[in-house]
Amino acid sequence: MIKNRVCKHKLLIVVDNIDDKFEFDKLFGNLGDFSSDTRFIFTTRDKRVLDFIPECKLYEPGEMSLCQSLHLFSKHAFGMKYPPEEDVRISEEFVKVATGVPLALKVIGSLLFRRERKFWEEKLRELQDIPSTIKNMVQERLKISYNDLSHNEKQIFLDIACFFVGSHKDLPYYMWSSCGFYPESGIDTLIHRSLIKLDKGNKFWMRDHIKDLGRAIVKEEDVRHPYNRTKIWFTNDVLDMLRNGEVKFFLNDLVTFHPY
């Protein structure tokens, strides 16, 4: 029934963030079952996976133009298509340091929304001090927004990045409440800063660059020894920690505070 219906209609099908485990036939069946006017769009971080998709052509989007970038930045920084006349020049400076990356424009604009002029000027100087040639330029610029969070908001952000992307918000909610992190206001702040989203099922969603940022921040706590970090999410790191007895001190602390 589905096959008979889809072959009669012109469809646009978008599949986000595919990886090497993606199999077109298992998800969609035979490409010939679709109308010749149907178009598929796949996004991926590894263009090699596109080699296994039938009749697929690679399109690499370039940087946004200055005009497009200014519109996107203004939408998040002012809630309008164009910045006010007195803010055009400083807005263009922020657009330049974002180098046409939509995610950076969105996050930086959200950070500046309804903030004082002195805050804008300080953040602009901070962003301009980041060298544009470093490999993780985008990540470093997104970190400006993370640095502006409170301690509680940072902990919630890092927990989501490491463990709770795709999880219902109620799953860690009581844990954060017990830790005194005030999750209601914390989650609201992260949403307004464009660092996370809640989908229709109230599940956490986060862009890959932002999730990578959160995990990179945790890794920086101790690059060589994962068991010294505040969060461990890779199975191999956990197994290595258990095999080498690095967990014994942590377990002793648990026994001390939770003897039963």
Image (cartoon, grey):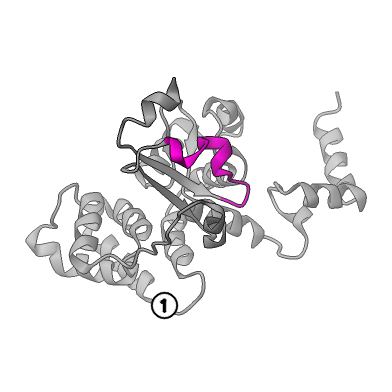
Task: Measuring from the top left, give residue 92's x and y in whole percent.
Answer: 20, 69
Seen in the picture, residue 35 relative to 108 is either above or below; the reply is above
Highlighted range, magenta: 19-33
Which residue is painted at 56% across and 32% down in the image? Answer: 167
Q: Nearer the viewer, residue 21 or 79?
A: 21
Above-or-below relation of 110 to 118: above
Crowd band around label 1 with a 10 angstrom C-alpha radius: few (<14), some (14–19), many (20+): some
Q: Which residue is mark 1?
A: 132
Residue 68, how many percent across, how many down? 21, 61
**Residue 53 shown in magenta:** no
Residue 229 lies in quadrant: bottom right
Q: Residue at x 13, y 56 (%)?
A: 82
Q: Amino acid at mark 1?
A: Ser
Residue 11 position by quadrant = top left
Q: Position of residue 175 (x, y in %)?
A: 61, 30
* Residue 99 placement, left or right of 71: right
223 with respect to 247 (left or right): left
| Towards the viewer: 89 or 139 | 139
